[in-house]
Image (cartoon, rainbow, N blue to C red):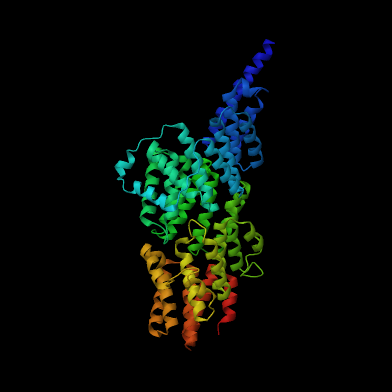
Amino acid sequence: RGKLVMEDGMKEWVAELNLKAGCEAISLSAFRNASSFFKAGISLLCSNCWDKNYDLTLQLHNFYAEVEFCNGRFDEVGRVTKIIIEKAKSLDDRLCAYSILIKTLGAQKKMRNAIELSLSVLDDLGEPVQDTSRDDLVKTVHVFIKMENSQFSNLKKMEDNKKGAVMKLLHTLSFYCVFAESRYLPFALNRMLELTLSHGVCKESCSAFATISFILCGLHGDWTGSSRSGELALLLLERLQAREYESNVRNFVSTAQSWTDPIRMTIKKKFTSFEIGMQTGAIDDAMYSAAGCCYYQFFCGIELPILEKDCRRFIKQMSEYKQTLAKDRVTILLQVALNLMGKSNNPLELTGEAMIQSQFIEECPKQMKCGFYILSSWLAYLFGEYKLASLAVSNRMEAEKTTHKKLEWVGFTLFYDCLIYLASARRKQNSLTSDISGKSKMSGFYPTALMKKLVDYTQCNNQHRLLLVEAEVAYSKGEYNVAIEKYDSAIVAAEVVGILHEQAICNERAGDFFLAHGNIKRATSHYGHAIDLYHRWGAQAKVDHLCKQVP
């Protein structure tokens, strides 16, 4: 009998060694090795371990579930978290399992389930949902905006563990509310700020400010609130050394900063955020950053073969880690690239190797659906199908009615809305004109005024866009000399910023203008430049299309 007791004691000691080894492996970002250590430790526990050695058992199971989430083994996460929830003695001891389970649901696009579970646990913690509007959130944000850096830095640290647990859940809730366009987003963010004011700052406070910076940025936002929230997020990140939230914070803040910084700077910031997330085990944040990196490459006009390669690389990782939400975001961009490169049957329909358009639309969340309509309208415009482009814009505007934040994509959306509007009006295809000008969609749509507001944010990213819109307006008004001046200026400005496809579009529109006015020589010259630029970009389908259209 004494020998058996010794063996049990030895097993417990070795299980503790496995716990320490697993934690060390986590610090080295070796999550698969960590999983093996924790699993081995659990296998050494006795049958009544939850009674005999509760703390060790709980720690091993919690860590094992956490690293299996990082490894994308969601079935195992579900099995282990179920055990923890059943065996844990208190709600506090179940919180870690709930948090991991919520993230697992969200990663698999089960965002409604993730949000409902978050709200249920918050209610158990004495934090029921409060009726909170966006205006309520902005008012609370401005309490912090008025603080000097010194005053903000002197805010006490949160010491209440229960409120700390609430902040963790609110952080997870807010992350998925962003993508699900849930009505609970203002509540989650506002409550995080309220708790920060009343109980002190914590690591999750960084995330709250970063998310708010993202939510409030753009033409339809509150730039003062967005900019200052981003600054506070980075200040707090440094003060608290909140490494586990660094990927999340830097990703959201970089999106807000892209409105004022040269857009190419954002690509590097997104990739850095991706690397940090992979190192720290914030896999969902890492993959969201990777998706952002791909989109900003696209906005910058990176060559399509490079974009295709990076999209495929990230999609492979997202598949390995079962990050379905992030994977779907990149998949649609990959199909756009394939269409442009001539690797699909119909360049206007996002159906091919990467996805099936009808299936995607049926299954994707509302925000992603808006992104689909933006890209669809852009493709239709690029290939001269203005009626189809108009329809896609109308569908997007309908979907946007219940969203917290419009997908502006650093001016990309507005720019092409303006071009589609002007092209449709000029060709008397009035479906978009009625939708955009009428009170049912957007009253008072003035392309030039809106583009000037956009340029006020960042001239380096949008000056060529304003000039092209002004050229198209002058063309529509019959102002021949003004149009020529604006087209020439737009082409030069687009070349300076170096966005290949927008350089090509400027030249193509100039070609259309000169062709319509009988100047074949200049039209042919601009079309030739456009074809060359589209070719350099890698858009063989567009090259073929334009070659068939030009004289």
Q: Which residue lies furthest to the front in this view?
A: 131
What is the x, y in percent for residue 113?
60, 46
Which sits in the foreground, 504 or 145?
145
- The image shows residue 468, relative to residue 370, as above or below, that is below
Residue 30 visible in image: no
What is the x, y in percent for residue 164?
46, 35
Residue 183 visible in image: yes
The mark tally for this picture is 0
For the C terminus, the image quarter is bottom right
Which sits in the foreground, 155 or 521?
155
Which sits in the foreground, 202 or 355?
202
Q: Residue furthest right?
A: 1
- The image shows residue 271, relative to residue 101, as above or below, that is below
Q: Is residue 322 left or right of residue 424?
A: right
What is the x, y in percent for residue 129?
50, 43
Q: Residue at x 53, y 41 (%)?
A: 281
Which sits in the foreground, 29 or 161?
161
Q: Which residue lies furthest to the bottom in this view?
A: 518
Q: In this view, does 2 lie to the left or right of 539?
A: right
Q: Which residue is drawn at 38% across and 47% down?
A: 140
What is the x, y in percent for residue 293?
50, 55
For the N terminus, the image quarter is top right
